Amino acid sequence: MTYSFNGKNKTWLTAGIAVGLLCMALTWFGDDDFHTRFWSNFLHNSVFFTGIALMAGFFMTASITAWAGWYVVFKRVWESISLYLMVGIPLMLIVGLGVLLHWNHLYHWSDQSILDPNVPEKFDAILYGKKGFLNTTWYIGGTLLLGGIWIFILNKIRTLSLKEDREGTDGFKKHYGVRKWAAIFLPFAGFGSAAMVWQWVMSVDAHWYSTLFAWYCGASWFVSMISLTIIIILFLKSKGYYQNVTTEHFHDLGKFLFAFSIFWAYLWFSQYMLIWYANVGEETVYFKERITNYPTLFYLNLGINFVAPFFILMRNDTKRKMGSLAFTAGLVLFGHWLDFFLMLKPGILHTAHAAAGHGEHSAEAGHGAHDAAAHGAEHAVSHFEAGFTFPGLLELGTFIGFLCLFIFFVLNMLSKAPLTGDNDPYIEESIHHHT
Amino acid sequence: MSQSKDIIYGLWNDEEDLLRAVKVAVGDHLEIMDVYTPFPIHGLDPLLGLSESRLHIAGFIYGSLGTLTAFLGMSWIFTKDWPIIFGGKPHWAVPSFIPITFELTVLFAAIGMVVTFYLINGLGPGVVNPTIDLRITDDKFCIAFDKSEVDVGQVESFLKNNGASEIHSKTI
């Protein structure tokens, strides 16, 4: 059965995208000189949905490589989600172009004036040491190169999968092709995502680094990806499609939602506890900033993304009942959007203050490495700043816009091919899946 | 130990045939004593009318007890009983309690569930449970009837007509 993406759904989603564009325009005109709020919202939502697409590709290829069969009835959903990279990577390139041409001041390292050792009063030794990786060439080049490889391989897989559907397996030849490309994709997705997380997300706190940040960020994307998968399949099911996706499949998706929420919390805690225990100024600045100035979001993040799914999805039946599953999926999706908000906004606000600042930056920079901790205290935001300390209505509107764009793309992609690939070698196993 | 029983049982070679036979037996209102299989069979529990195990509820309670024991225990020890400063951290240093709290939660839940499972099933060191036929631990599927609860003639014809490869009587 092929999904027909009808006019009514298109109208609603276009309206959502329009709301997003309107909110972005409003943000732009009510913004500071560097349009920091606009650009940070743009980066926040672009990175969030690009990562979700990448994780769909990653999980799909991991499942293919592991000879998993249970998900095959709805594999088109992950194929479609993963191809959203074709939208997400260009969006990230716009951010990169903004960094290159100084349209925005999202990243502290993009400020060239602090990298000159001959100007000691402005010189920043830490960022000077990192300039081999934190620079626009890597930012844009990495996005282009890795993003290009991801899109290329995922397109190959999609093409082979559709071909298999039309022409039959003929001795599993196409399936072997899919398997080969999936195996090639995995290292690019695994190592490549870490490299891009450092560039896209972690480098907003340019002085700070954490070795497990890439996994933490990846887990956040992964959980969001599972949530969106559940929501999209439930929507299609309510329209009469995907009747072959049963409670058993949702049970497994629910288990992934549950398990990876715990995995996310495990990484969150591992990062937090090591930094708390070592109590080294350069590292604690990340959490000090967030606990002091963003306490509500900081604890809400844990509540929504760990405590809630942990207790709601612990029981067998809450994973099998669509109401509780859909509720948790929606909650956790929003929660991880907040998580990314909390990863990005504090660092960006610092950079913006430094850029708009009155030379305060140079006062501390001469001391080099020892000043990373002081850095946090100096620029600390003690007052409420809408769109930074807490997401405002404009942030929510922008989120809705990007979400609608994402769903529009996925549904459009789904409508181009039969929802279930009948010639996949694992299709019978998947139809009779029993947890 | 319970008193010995006279039973009659049939052996099947395939789990699908066994499931069909169980359906027929339930349809004919034959009182099945028990079904023995080498591995869990999907769909057998609801056919036999077995309710969901409550072991996991016990597990949750044991786990919560473990959480409380660890967290309250450490809180009391490090703030009241024997406060020591570790690495300049406050006495009530919650983040450092969390790994141990997690471990005791798992430990309590695991041991509690094992003990409960053994008690409920009458298992334990030195207990010998009679096995109807050793091959049910290998490749045979068995439906057993208690002769005192069923019409033996009816059971025999049921076993013959529903694909049982062997029919035996035994006292256990």
Image: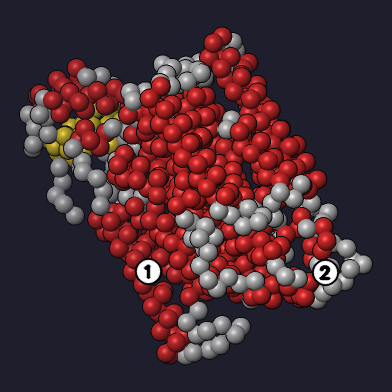
Asked if marks 2 and 1 fall on the same chain, the answer is no
Q: Quadrant of the N terminus of chain A?
A: top left
User: In front here: B163 or A225?
Assistant: A225
User: In front here: A165 or A124?
Assistant: A124
Residue positioned 24% across, 45% down in the render: B52
Name the kind of residue labelled 2 in the image: Lys
The spot of residue B134 in percent (x, y) is: 34, 37
Report the disc number at residue B150: none
Cα gap from disc 2 to disc 1, whole angstroms = 55 Å
The spot of residue A32 in percent (x, y) is: 62, 57
The spot of residue A292 in percent (x, y) is: 53, 73
Residue positioned 61% across, 72% down in the render: A380
Quick one: which residue is furthest to the front in this view? A29
Q: Is residue B160 visible?
A: yes
Residue positioned 37% across, 69% down in the render: B66
Q: How is the image coloured?
A: secondary structure
Residue A87 drawn above or below residue A257:
above
Residue A180 drawn above or below residue A329:
above
Residue wearing tag 2: A122
Quick one: which residue is furthest to the right in this view? A118
Residue wearing tag 1: B66
The spot of residue A372 in percent (x, y) is: 72, 71
Q: Quadrant of residue A113?
A: bottom right
Name the side, left or right, on which B112 lies relative to A112.
Answer: left
Q: Residues within 10 Å of mark 2 (few under 14, many from 20)?
A: many
Mark 2 or mark 1: which is in front?
A: 2
Name the kind of residue labelled 1 in the image: Gly
Q: Quadrant of residue A89?
A: top right
